[in-house]
């Protein structure tokens, strides 16, 4: 009963620190993505990947890096945290990207505070 | 380009009364449409999805939504609210955009259910 697993659930960082948010899925999905959720703004796409070795930018990519070395894992890196990156982060995965009817499965989120 | 407008940021109903959460979308292509629910401190869970097979879509927990192309709407309804329905609801549109699949989220509607 795994699905999409995100770690950690909560994190507090100081400005300028770096960290990696982990995301793993066990459904053999090709398509994975990271979103941030801010009050009154819904979810906004940060980066996404259509398969191992392939990543691309979403709507709000600045300040974040990603890599996809395996199908299962899609970590999100903050190189130098800023207070504007305080948010709740969600990882999602789905099967074939080109199937518009495919459901996206979401992790439980990581609540990040940058002080 | 696609967009989603959730017309109410907050909706409050009494237990046992009907629920209506409104969503309008804009899409250049034939979209897929979804409703997701997020309970406090939880991830997002799919309620239902429109796949072009039928305009009235039934989801989990007694929710349903009707796709109206002429009105570009996809409103979510439930005949009788339950206390456990209190959560935030997101309307989501998905379409192919310049060769990649993109999910666009509405800003969310917080549903309160009064005893």
Image: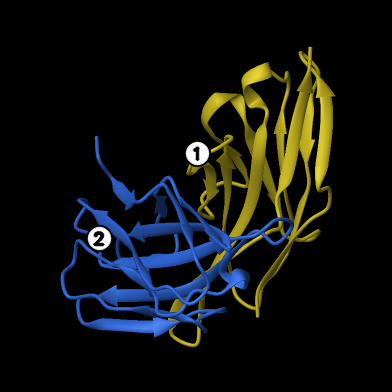
Q: Quadrant of residue A32?
A: bottom left
The residue located at (65%, 74%) in the rendering is B2
Rendered image coloring scheme: by chain
Quadrant placement of the C terminus of chain B: top right
Give the drawing colour for chain B. yellow
* For residue A73, side relative to residue B26 (left or right): left
From the top left corner, tell me how far across and down residue B26 is, in percent.
72, 70
**Chain letter for blue?**
A
Q: Depth check: B49 or A2 in front?
A: A2
Farthest residue to the bottom: give it: B98
Image depth: mark 1 or mark 2 in front = 1
The residue located at (54%, 34%) in the rendering is B59
Q: Depth check: A93 or B60 in front?
A: A93
From the top left corner, tell me how far across and down residue B18 is, in percent.
79, 24
Q: Depth check: B97 or A60 in front?
A: A60
From the top left corner, tell me how far across and down residue A39 is, in percent.
70, 56
The residue located at (60%, 24%) in the rendering is B62
Q: Which residue is mark 1?
A: B42
Q: Quadrant of residue A86?
A: bottom right
Rendered position, A87 above or below B27: above
* For residue B106, side relative to residue A34 (left or right): right
SS class of the residue under badge 2?
loop
* For residue B59, side relative to residue B15 (left or right): left
Label 2 lies in what chain? A
Same chain check for tags 1 and 2:
no
Farthest residue to the left: give it: A70
Rendered position, B73 above or below A34: above
Please tell me how crowded label 1 is: few (under 14), some (14-19), or many (20+) other residues with Cα within 10 Å: few
Q: Which mark is residue A29?
A: 2
From the top left corner, tell me how far across and down residue B63 is, in percent.
62, 31
């Amino acid at each position: 009963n795994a699905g999409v697993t995100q770690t950690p659930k909560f994190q507090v960082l100081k400005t300028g620190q770096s960290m990696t948010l982990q995301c793993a899925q066990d459904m053999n999905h090709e398509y994975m993505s990271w979103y941030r959720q801010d009050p009154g703004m819904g979810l906004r796409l940060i980066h996404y990947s259509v398969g191992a070795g392939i990543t691309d930018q979403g709507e709000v990519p600045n300040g974040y890096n990603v890599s996809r070395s395996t199908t299962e894992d899609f970590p999100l890196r903050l190189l130098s945290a800023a207070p504007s990156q305080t948010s709740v982060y969600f990882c999602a995965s789905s099967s074939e990207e080109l199937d518009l009817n495919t459901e996206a499965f979401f992790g439980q989120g990581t609540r990040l505070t940058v002080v | 380009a696609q967009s989603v407008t959730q017309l109410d940021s907050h909706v409050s109903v009494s237990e046992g009364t009907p629920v209506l959460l409104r969503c309008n979308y804009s899409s250049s292509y034939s979209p897929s449409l979804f409703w997701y629910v997020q309970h406090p401190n939880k991830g997002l869970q799919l309620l239902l999805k429109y796949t072009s097979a039928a305009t009235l879509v039934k989801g989990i927990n007694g929710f349903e939504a009707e796709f109206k192309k002429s009105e570009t709407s996809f409103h979510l309804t439930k005949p009788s609210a339950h206390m456990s329905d209190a959560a935030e609801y997101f309307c989501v549109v998905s379409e192919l955009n310049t060769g990649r699949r993109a999910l666009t989220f509405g800003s969310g509607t917080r549903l309160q259910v009064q005893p």
